[in-house]
Image: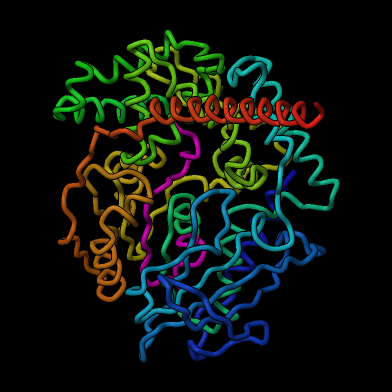
C-alpha cells in the first residue's frame, strides 16, 4: 500500500525545484533526434526521443522508466509558448494526436507518453478482458461481479509480482513526467490542451506547478469523483434527448415519449433474435458508450424503437458488438490504477449504481467499480481528490449533452473555483469527437485565438443539428443485412460443394 506520508514529503521536495528555466525554447536534449510527423497529409518537422523518470518518486530506490516524447515543431517563424497535449482515457495512448495545422503555426506541440500505456510498462490486464464479458451473458449478476473483483485482484497481484510498483502509476506522477519533459526540452511556461481524463491531469498540474502554466484548455471536463457515472445524471441527459425528440418531426412520429420507450424496452427486452442471443446488460453497456455523441446516439434510439415494435435485430447487433469491442476497450490496468487511486470512495456502496428506478442505471460504472476495493494500491493525497482553487487562465469547452463528462460537473463544480476561468457550451454536442469534428473551423478559431490572446472567440459556432432519421444504415437494417449476407454466402458455398461433387462423380463415371 502507498505510504502516504512519504509520498507527500517527496512531492513537497519536488515542488521546491524551480520550474522556470531560461534556456531557449528551441534547444534539445541528446535524447531528441529529428523526425517527421504526418498531420493532415503534410509531413512536418519534429523531434522524437524520450525522457527518463522514476517509476515511483516516493521510493528512493525506484527503477527508471523510459517514456517516449514527440515534439512537433511550430511551422511559423515565431514560436509562442508550446502546447502540451493530454489525451483522454485512462488507458489510451498520449502519442497519437493529430493537431489542427492552425495550432502549429505559432506553437510547438508536445506529446509525452503516459506511464502505464506508452513506454516499457503496459498495465495490460487480460484478466479484465475476460471478466468484462460477464457470466452467462450477464454483467451485473452476483457471479459477474465476483468475476470482476477476482480479475481486479489477480491483475494487481500479477503486475506486482512482475516488478511493477503500482503506487507509481497515479495522476500526480503523470504531471511530474510532463514537468520533466518541459524542463528537458528547455521550455519556460507552457499551454495545456487536455481532453476528458486528460483534464483531470490538467487540474492537478495547476495544483502542483501553476508557475509552469500559461493557459489551459479542457475539452470534455472530468472533475474529481467523476470516473464514476451517476445514474441520475444519465437519466437527466436522456430527458434532454426526449425533449429534442418531441421537437423533431421524424422522432415524434416514432414515439410519443422517447425516454419511456427506452425504459419499457429495458424492462421487457427480448433475449433472442433469429437464434442470436440478446443480453440486456450488454445492450445497456454498449448503448451508454454510443450515447457519448449524438451522431451515434440516434442509432441507439432507432434500435430501441424497432424493439418496441417487436424487432430485436438492432439489439442483437449491439449485444454482439459488446463482446467484440469492450474487452479491448482500454488498457484495463491503467484505468484501474488512475481511476481507482483518484476516485475510489471506500465508504460508498457502489451497488447503488444499479438504481432500479433509473432508465438504464449506470452500466459502465456498474462494471468498472464492482471490484474497486480489490485493487492493490492506495488513493492519491486528498488534496488532489477534490476541486482546488486556481488562478491559471483556463477555458472549459463542454458539449451540453455529453454523457461521458456531463456539463453540470464542469459548470457547477469546477468553474466557480477558477479565478480566470471561462466556459464555452456547445449546443447539441457531446463528447470530444464532436468538439473536434462537428464544426472544426469554429474549434480552430476558438483555440488559436484563446492561446494567443486569452480571449474567447466562439463566433463561428452554430447550434448543431441532430438528425434522428438514421436512414437505411440503421442498426436493425445492418443486422438483417449481415444475416442475409451469411445466408447468401452459405447458399453459395453449399451450391459450390454440390457442383464439385457432381463433377467428381462425372469424372469417376
Quarter in which the C terminus is drawn? top right
**Position of residue 444 in the picture relative to residue 216 (left or right):** left
Specify start and end residues of the magenta stretch as a single range.
205-229
The location of residue 221, given as percent across then percent down, is 39, 49
Quarter in which the N terminus is drawn? top right
| Residue shown at the point (35%, 63%) measured from the top left | 391
Q: Is residue 392 above or below residue 386?
A: below
The location of residue 373, given as percent across then percent down, is 67, 30
Quadrant assignment, res 408: top left
Q: Is residue 504 above or below residue 58?
A: above
| Residue shown at the point (41%, 68%) measured from the top left | 99
**Is 410 inside the magenta-drawn segment?**
no
| Residue shown at the point (24%, 42%) measured from the top left | 428
Q: Does the rendering let one see residue 246?
A: yes
Quadrant assignment, res 80: bottom left
The location of residue 493, given as percent across then percent down, is 63, 30
Q: Is residue 270 above or below residue 155?
A: above
**Position of residue 507 in the picture relative to residue 19 (left or right):** right
| Residue shown at the point (32%, 53%) measured from the top left | 435
Amino acid at each position: 500500500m502507498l505510504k502516504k506520508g512519504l509520498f507527500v514529503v517527496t512531492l513537497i521536495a519536488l515542488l521546491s525545484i524551480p520550474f522556470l528555466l531560461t534556456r531557449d525554447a528551441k534547444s534539445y536534449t541528446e535524447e531528441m533526434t529529428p523526425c517527421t510527423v504526418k498531420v493532415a497529409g503534410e509531413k512536418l518537422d519534429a523531434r522524437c526521443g524520450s525522457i527518463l523518470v522514476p517509476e515511483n518518486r516516493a521510493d528512493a530506490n525506484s527503477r527508471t522508466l523510459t517514456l517516449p516524447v514527440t515534439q512537433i515543431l511550430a511551422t511559423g517563424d515565431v514560436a509562442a509558448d508550446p502546447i502540451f497535449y493530454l489525451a483522454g482515457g485512462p488507458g489510451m495512448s498520449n502519442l497519437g494526436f493529430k493537431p489542427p495545422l492552425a495550432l502549429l503555426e505559432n506553437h510547438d506541440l508536445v506529446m509525452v507518453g503516459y506511464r502505464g500505456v506508452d513506454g516499457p510498462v503496459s498495465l495490460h490486464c487480460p484478466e479484465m478482458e475476460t471478466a468484462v464479458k460477464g457470466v452467462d451473458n450477464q454483467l451485473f449478476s452476483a457471479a459477474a461481479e465476483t468475476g470482476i473483483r477476482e480479475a481486479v485482484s489477480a491483475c494487481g497481484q500479477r503486475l506486482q509480482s512482475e516488478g511493477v510498483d503500482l503506487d507509481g502509476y497515479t495522476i500526480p506522477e503523470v504531471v511530474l513526467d510532463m514537468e520533466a519533459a518541459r524542463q528537458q526540452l528547455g521550455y519556460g511556461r507552457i499551454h495545456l490542451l487536455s481532453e476528458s481524463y486528460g483534464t483531470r491531469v490538467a487540474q492537478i498540474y495547476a495544483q502542483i506547478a501553476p508557475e509552469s502554466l500559461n493557459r489551459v484548455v479542457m475539452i470534455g471536463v472530468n472533475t474529481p469523483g467523476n470516473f464514476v457515472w451517476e445514474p441520475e445524471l444519465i437519466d437527466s441527459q436522456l430527458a434532454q434527448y426526449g425533449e429534442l425528440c418531441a421537437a423533431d418531426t421524424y422522432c415524434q412520429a416514432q414515439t410519443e415519449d422517447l425516454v419511456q420507450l427506452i425504459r419499457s424496452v429495458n424492462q421487457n427486452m427480448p433475449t433472442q433474435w433469429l437464434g442470436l442471443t440478446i443480453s440486456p446488460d450488454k445492450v445497456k453497456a454498449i448503448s451508454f458508450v454510443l450515447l457519448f455523441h449524438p451522431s451515434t446516439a440516434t442509432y441507439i434510439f432507432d434500435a430501441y424503437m424497432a424493439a418496441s415494435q417487436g424487432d430485436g435485430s438492432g439489439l442483437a447487433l449491439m449485444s454482439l458488438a459488446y463482446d467484440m469491442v469492450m474487452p479491448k476497450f482500454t488498457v484495463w490496468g491503467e484505468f484501474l490504477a488512475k481511476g481507482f487511486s483518484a476516485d475510489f470512495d471506500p465508504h460508498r456502496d457502489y451497488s447503488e449504481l444499479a438504481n432500479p428506478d433509473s432508465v438504464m442505471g449506470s452500466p459502465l460504472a456498474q462494471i468498472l467499480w464492482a471490484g474497486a476495493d480489490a485493487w492493490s494500491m492506495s488513493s492519491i493525497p486528498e488534496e488532489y481528490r477534490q476541486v482546488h482553487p486556481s488562478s491559471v487562465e483556463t477555458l472549459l469547452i463542454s458539449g451540453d449533452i455529453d454523457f461521458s463528462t456531463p456539463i453540470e460537473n464542469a459548470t457547477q463544480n469546477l468553474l466557480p473555483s477558477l479565478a480566470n476561468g471561462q466556459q464555452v457550451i456547445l449546443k447539441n454536442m457531446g463528447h470530444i469527437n464532436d468538439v473536434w469534428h462537428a464544426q472544426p473551423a469554429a474549434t480552430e478559431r476558438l483555440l488559436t485565438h484563446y492561446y494567443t490572446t486569452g480571449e474567447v472567440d466562439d463566433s463561428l459556432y452554430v447550434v448543431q443539428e441532430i438528425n434522428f432519421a438514421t436512414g437505411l444504415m440503421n442498426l436493425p437494417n445492418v443486422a438483417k443485412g449481415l444475416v442475409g449476407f451469411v445466408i447468401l454466402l452459405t447458399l453459395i458455398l453449399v451450391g459450390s460443394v454440390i457442383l464439385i461433387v457432381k463433377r467428381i462423380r462425372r469424372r469417376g463415371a
